[in-house]
Amino acid sequence: MPVQKQIGDESSSANQFLQQIFESRMKNEIDENDLLYILNHTELSRTFDRNSTFNIDHSKLLIAAIAHSKNTLTYPEFVTVVNLLHSWRNLFRRHDLDRNGIIEPYALVNILNSLRFNLSPSTLETVVKRYSTRADEHSSPKVTFEHYIQVCARLTLLNDLMHQKSGNGSPRSICSFSIDEFMQLALNL
């Protein structure tokens, strides 16, 4: 059975597969370097876009998005990261019709809306400007898989922390932060 199918279902073979990968690091919790190695250099890496690689910033963001205040992942948190990555990958692939690892900015907006981040049009415009790139000055902006993963991880982290601070879960709630809390949040991004 191909790895992609193993990860997508909730079977015991999929759980065993992930547990073997996690335990290969020989730790109870993995850090950003372990996660980076797992995402790029194990059989799990074949389940992502073959032209893309993860970097240390991706690992740190993914850990922060799931574990918030700690710098490591337990096995259940690792499984959550893998499931999120596969969910995000599947959404990306629906919009990457030529399978080149690049989508149009409007596709990013559609994906973010489908993920229900509830961003205002001006915030969406900021996200597109921040995460899209041009091959040259005459080309239209594009969003790579790597940038897409960054924006999804950052928005997940921000969304979770804002919901914790607002308490009522409304996307347009008001949150209060001390300067120190804001600095910690901003530095995690």
Image (tube, rainbow, N blue to C red):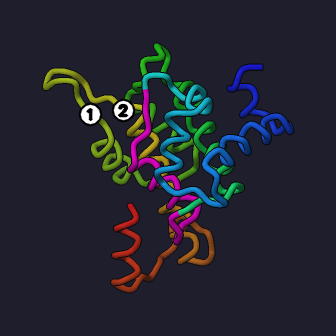
Q: Amino acid at mark 2?
A: Val
Magenta segment's dominant SS is helix
Residue 149 percent location from the top left of the image: 46, 42
Q: CA distance from mark 1 to mark 2?
A: 6 Å
Image vertical order of residue 109 relative to residue 117, above or below: above
Residue 34 percent location from the top left of the image: 52, 49
9 or 44, which lies in front? 44
Task: Report the label total.
Answer: 2
Residue 53 percent location from the top left of the image: 43, 33
Image quadrant assignment for residue 179: bottom left
Q: Please provide the residue range marked out in magenta.
A: 52-71
- Residue placed at 43% from the left, 23% from the top? 51
134 or 166, which lies in front? 134
CB within 8 Å, label 1 to label 2: yes
Which residue lies under the disc numbered 2?
A: 143
Residue 112 percent location from the top left of the image: 50, 44
Secondary element at tag 2: strand
Task: Specify few, some or many for label 2: CA neighbours under 10 Å numbering under 14, 14-19, or 20 or more.
Answer: many
Image quadrant assignment for residue 147: top left
Residue furthest bottom in the image = 178
Q: Amino acid at mark 1?
A: Thr
> Is residue 118 toward the left or the right of residue 121 in the image?
right
> Is residue 156 toward the left or the right of residue 2 in the image?
left
Quarter of the image containing the N terminus? top right
Quarter of the image containing the C terminus? bottom left
185 or 81, which lies in front? 81
